[in-house]
Amino acid sequence: MDAERLKAAVVASVGAHRDTILSVLDELHRNPETGLREFASSALLSGILERGGFALERGVGGMETAFCARWGSGGPAIAVLAEMDALPGLGHACGHNVIAAAAVGAALSLRSCLPAELVRIAVLGTPAEELGIGKVDLIRAGLFDGIDFAMMVHPSSRRQVIKESLGLAKVRFRFLGKAAHAGAYPEDGINALDAVIQTFNGINALRQQLRQDVRVHGIITEGGVAPNIIPERAACYFYVRAAEMAELERVRERVIACARGAALATGCTLELEEEGRIIAPFRVNRTFSALYAGQLRYLGLEESTTPSGSKGSSDIGNVSQLVPTIHPHVPIGDGVRIHTEAFARAAISETGRCAALEGATAMALTAVDLALCAELRNGIRVEFQKKFT
Ligand SMILES: [Zn+2]
Ligand SMILES: [Zn+2]
């Protein structure tokens, strides 16, 4: 197989599918749907892929809006991930319409250009990223079993191939005490709000000993009903983030210990409620990332010279712990920040459209190299295995 000829064909094919790619970007943006309610978005994406020759499985992983579209009969199994959820009130302020458009574009161009026996493409419609649900549940349901490589792009203010993200665990604490008249019979009360405040104080003392890459932040969700009643119930909700899974686990335990200590000190009972899905930190694969960066050079595109060090959390982290994964950022507007109205506008702008086409092309070119070169595949796998030792 002539790699250069195939690559030129892939670039041309993304151009030929331009209207379809941009219609996905426009249509999702016009009708933004929040996590697990992406009914029209999921139907649009899966319908296009089905008509494009992909075999569709809908409602996978116990989620009505998740889907898996497969094509190809041999070679490496490559998952191309299509997020599609929007934010309540803000629409596509995280630009997942750009992600979905790029995924569909990459898939259609690969289907048009590559012989089926060289590659197996699985486009996974991954709902509810903003809720930290979609990919976690697809992993649990076995949708990533047998997948060799995973890729997606995310819109951003910058073109950046490697973008790390933090692991995230969510914990809710509810303290139960005893109500009493705060003025008349304070000695009868057990103050649940004190336990919440002690929890915050304990965690704030812990901060001094936390690593740079750890974040702990929380809110009070219930704090009493009136100043003259000692609060019988009070509750708080914390996020714990860290760049490594082991550190996330360690800090989560310490945060829980702060709440247990506060319960003991105040005489309250503690109810602990943990969100069942823990978001894993992103595991960078430099070899795989370099392969994508090479496609940018091929396309005459340069990475941003001022990479962003800011880190959020995303369920792509869980995928990256399981298979070699890339999550490059494509530029949709200078200086725009995610989860803002400006970002939502950028996700439909001319730059946003270019970003979707760039993502589609660069991912498809990356897949061509993976399909053609066993040495590249091995290099990525060797690096991935090393991280486990
Ligand atoms: Zn987001
Ligand atoms: Zn996002």
Image (spheres, rainbow, N blue to C red):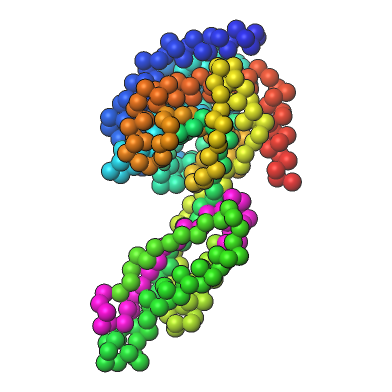
Residue 123 is covered by the magenta coloring? no
Residue 239 is covered by the magenta coloring? yes
Closer to the camera, 330 or 147? 330
Q: Which residues are magenta?
A: 225-251
Closer to the camera, 214 or 177? 214
Q: Residue at x 59, y 20 (%)?
A: 297
In the rendered view, does 157 fall on the left or right side of 320?
A: left
**Where residue 151 appears, x then y in whole percent?**
54, 31
Q: Residue at x 51, y 49 (%)?
A: 279
Instruction: Count every numbered label the image shows and give the total.
Output: 0
**Where residue 42 appears, x then y in whole percent?**
36, 31
Question: Can you see residue 55?
Answer: no
Question: Can you see residue 276?
Answer: yes
Closer to the camera, 190 or 201? 201
**Where residue 356 appears, x then y in whole percent?**
43, 24
Quadrant of the drawing holding the N terminus: top right
Query: Ligand 1 quadrant?
Result: top left
Q: Residue at x 51, y 45 (%)?
A: 310
Query: Above or below — where is 357 with respect to 99?
Result: above
**Where residue 47 appears, x then y in whole percent?**
36, 23
Query: Above or below — where is 176 with respect to 146?
Result: below
In the rendered view, does 35 fall on the left or right side of 370?
A: left
Q: Residue at x 28, y 43 (%)?
A: 89
In the rendered view, does 388 fall on the left or right side of 364?
A: right
Query: Above or below — where is 89 with respect to 190?
Result: above
